[in-house]
């Protein structure tokens, strides 16, 4: 799994996946429910694309987004109980 640290790297990774699947930009746009212009901008590394649409594209390509290096998420109710114990 590639490590992605820039919008250009994300665009390149998604373009590579699209091409490996044999999809055109319009076909991917249709499958993801976004416009072709969005796919063009995303693959070009535009830094201001909508995250919701990026997630749709990743899903349409059969991928998933994972975050590494972050602390594990604690359910909100457990976090509030832990805070109460400290007070």
Image: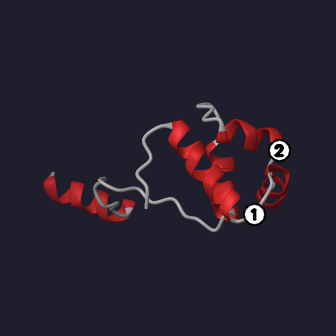
Q: Quadrant of residue 32?
A: bottom right
In what element is the residue under mark 1?
Answer: loop
Question: Closest to the observer: 81 or 43?
Answer: 43
Residue 77 location (% of width, % of height): 36, 63
Is 52 displayed left or right of 10 in the figure? right
Q: Depth check: 57 or 71 in front?
A: 57
The tag on residue 82 is none
Question: Badge 2: how crowded within 10 Å, few (<14), some, or many (20+)?
Answer: some
Above or below — where is 31 with respect to 43? Answer: below
Q: Counting residues from the N terminus, which is met first, the one under dot 1 or under dot 2? A: 1
Q: Which residue is mark 1?
A: 22
> Residue 78 appears in which quarter of the rendering?
bottom left
Tell me: 64 left or right of 28.
Answer: left
| Residue designated by label 2 | 36
Secondary element at image label 2: helix
Q: Residue at x 30, y 57 (%)?
A: 80
Distance, label 1 to label 2, CA atoms, is 16 Å
* Residue 76 on image: x %, y %: 38, 59
Residue drawn at x 30%, y 61% is 72
Judging depth in this view, the residue of 10 and 78 nearest the camera is 10
């Amino acid at each position: 799994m590639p490590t992605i640290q820039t919008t250009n790297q994300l665009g390149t990774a998604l373009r590579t996946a699209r091409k490996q699947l044999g999809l055109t930009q319009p076909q991917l746009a249709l499958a993801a429910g976004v416009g072709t212009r969005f796919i063009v901008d995303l693959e070009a590394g535009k830094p201001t694309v909508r995250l919701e649409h990026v997630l749709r594209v990743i899903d349409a390509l059969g991928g998933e987004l994972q975050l590494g290096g972050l602390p594990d998420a604690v359910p909100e109710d457990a976090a509030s109980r832990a805070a109460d114990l400290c007070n």
